[in-house]
Amino acid sequence: MVPRIRCVILIHIQGAIMKKTNLHSYISFNGNAAEAIEFYKSVFDATVTSNTFGEFAESMPSAPEDANKIMHAFIKNNHGVEFMLSDTPSSMTYSDGKRVV
């Protein structure tokens, strides 16, 4: 099951609905985010936008071993599934119990 948090917040001002906000989960991986992306893409028939740490090496230096890791990915389909994920860079501590934000 995909860890997913979805919350709709409706703000009422003088009886009128003024704003709708969706909250999305962000899942951290320990070097296997690319594999997870392919899995979620096939399961949810989703589109994916992603970047690796290596793509931003000039503007945001990172460790060479992180070059092919996913810095950020956004997964979305036409049925309301939306969430984000990334690999944890080697400069940060990965904690399996704190994977979903």
Image (spheres, rainbow, N blue to C red):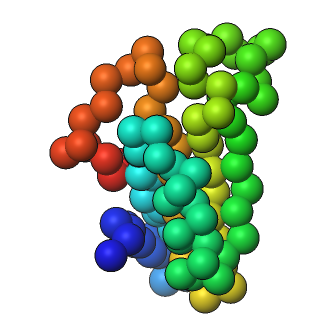
Image quadrant holding the N terminus, namely bottom left
Where residue 21 appears, x then y in whole percent? Answer: 53, 67
Where residue 12 appears, x then y in whole percent? Answer: 47, 75
Where residue 78 appears, x then y in whole percent? Answer: 68, 85
Residue 5 in the figure: left or right of residue 69 = left
Q: Quadrant of residue 38?
A: bottom right
How many badges with numbers are in the image? 0
Q: Quadrant of residue 92?
A: top left
* Residue in the image at 63% along x and 57% along y: 74
| Res. 45 in view | yes
* Residue in the image at 41% along x and 45% along y: 28
Determine whether 99 is above or below 78 in the image.
above
Determine whether 89 is above or below 33 in the image.
above
* Residue in the image at 44% along x and 32% along y: 88
Residue 48 in the figure: left or right of residue 27 = right
Residue 20 in the figure: left or right of residue 29 = right
* Residue in the image at 72% along x and 26% along y: 54
| Res. 18 in view | no
Determine whether 86 is above or below 3 in the image.
above
Residue 95 in the figure: left or right of residue 49 = left
Observer-nearest of 6 and 1: 1
Q: Residue furthest left?
A: 97
Observer-nearest of 86 and 42: 42
Where residue 72 appears, x then y in whole percent? Answer: 61, 43
Determine whether 26 is above or below 6 in the image.
above
